[in-house]
Amino acid sequence: MKDYYEILGVARDASGDDIKQAFRLLARQTHPDANPNDPTAEERFREIAEAYEVLSNPDRRARYDRGEVFGSQDLFSQFGGLDDILQQFFGAAFGGMGGFGRRRGPERGPDVAVRLDLSLEEAAFGLQREIEFTAPIRCEYCAGSGSEPGHDTATCPTCRGNGRVQVARNTFLGQMVTVAECSTCAGRGQIIEHPCTICRGAGRMEGTRTLTVDVPKGVENGTRLRLAGRGGAGENGGPSGDVYVQLRVAEDPRFERVGDDLHHRVTIGISEATFGISVSVPLLDGDVEELGIPAGTQPETVFRLAKQGVPRLQHRGRGDLLVHVDVGIPTELSPEEENALRDYADLRGEHPKPRKKGIFRR
């Protein structure tokens, strides 16, 4: 793992101001425009910017200190890129140089997050469900080109197809020739002379998409399904993003799920626990199974119904259904019931508290 503190030359307890000052100094020294003959300058500068992106943010810094690893591509794509960092520190003098002279090519479309609510039974046995969401979609009229059908794009006359132009600027390092994104074509190198009348030259537009999601058997609450390449349309012919389907499984009053096992509770009376009883236990698929509870069953006894739980995700077989038996203690008794229970206590040699007026009376 990269040592960002060492890269910036600061102590591990450095303040935010210390980190900012160190980055400002190193950015001036290592920027590729200040080191035109050094082929490693760009990589060193990106490493410094990466370290600053992590350590300047308290949340990311704390996660880094706990051992989390950050990718530079993810950092710059999520938080605005090198251009934003440079403009924040140095203003327009460094603006537009995050790409270091490279032409702006196809860009990947945005990812889309969708929530899908399921019952416990649907999560257990799987299903197909349609989802609907709004995202950039490719313009079918111009096939995503941005040009009116029958017309092609033209090479940008300002940058001659490079997507970047050289600009002479007076900076703290003196007059420097820097490379900036071409404002005429926005870095694409091509211009659209006859924009599509539907998407107005964008090649894509906001629209509603409907997809069918195959939910596999055995998914849990919080499971995230990825539909690769089904998200928002990319720019300049770039690939589409992904769709992430977040599953939310509703609670079921009959069962508590623990892994692939289900837990169900039944309550029986004292006499039923003493002499035994047959109880109806609901099953996940909607059926009912009769469970024989033998005489003398104690409270919190657990009976196991094999293979009546949740199907195992991406594996064969199912979990079990565990039936927990509670023995209900009455809180109210009629005079006849109380007399019978005290007679029983006498026969057993038990010594409950004496009878009190008003207790267990209806």
Image (tube, grey):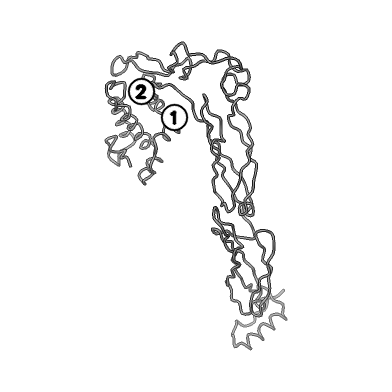
Above or below, comparing residue 29 to residue 328 in the picture: above
Label of residue 80 in the image: 1
Give the residue drawn at x 63%, y 20%.
198
Above or below, comparing residue 121 to residue 113 in the picture: below
Where's residue 238, x and y in %? Answer: 51, 28
Three-letter code, disc 1: Gly
Label of residue 12 in the image: none
Q: Is residue 154 left or right of residue 47?
A: right
Q: Secondary structure at mark 1?
A: loop
Q: Nearer the viewer, residue 258 or 160?
A: 160
- Which of discs 2 and 1 lies nearer the camera? The answer is 1
Above or below, comparing residue 78 to residue 187 in the picture: below
Q: Quick one: which residue is furthest to the top in this view?
A: 157
Give the residue drawn at x 37%, y 40%.
61
Q: Secondary structure at mark 2?
A: helix
Within 10 Å of disc 2 (Cα), the crowding (few <14, some 14-19, many 20+) is some
Q: Nearer the viewer, residue 55 or 177?
A: 177
- Which one is earlier in the sequence, the residue at label 2 or at label 1? 1
Three-letter code, disc 2: Phe
Give the residue drawn at x 36%, y 46%.
67
Q: Nearer the viewer, residue 16 or 40?
A: 40
Above or below, comparing residue 130 to residue 43 in the picture: below
Q: Which residue position is annotated with label 2? A: 90
Rendering quarter of residue 226: top right
Rendering quarter of residue 209: top right
Where's residue 56, x and y in %? Answer: 37, 35
Q: Quadrant of the C terminus?
A: bottom right
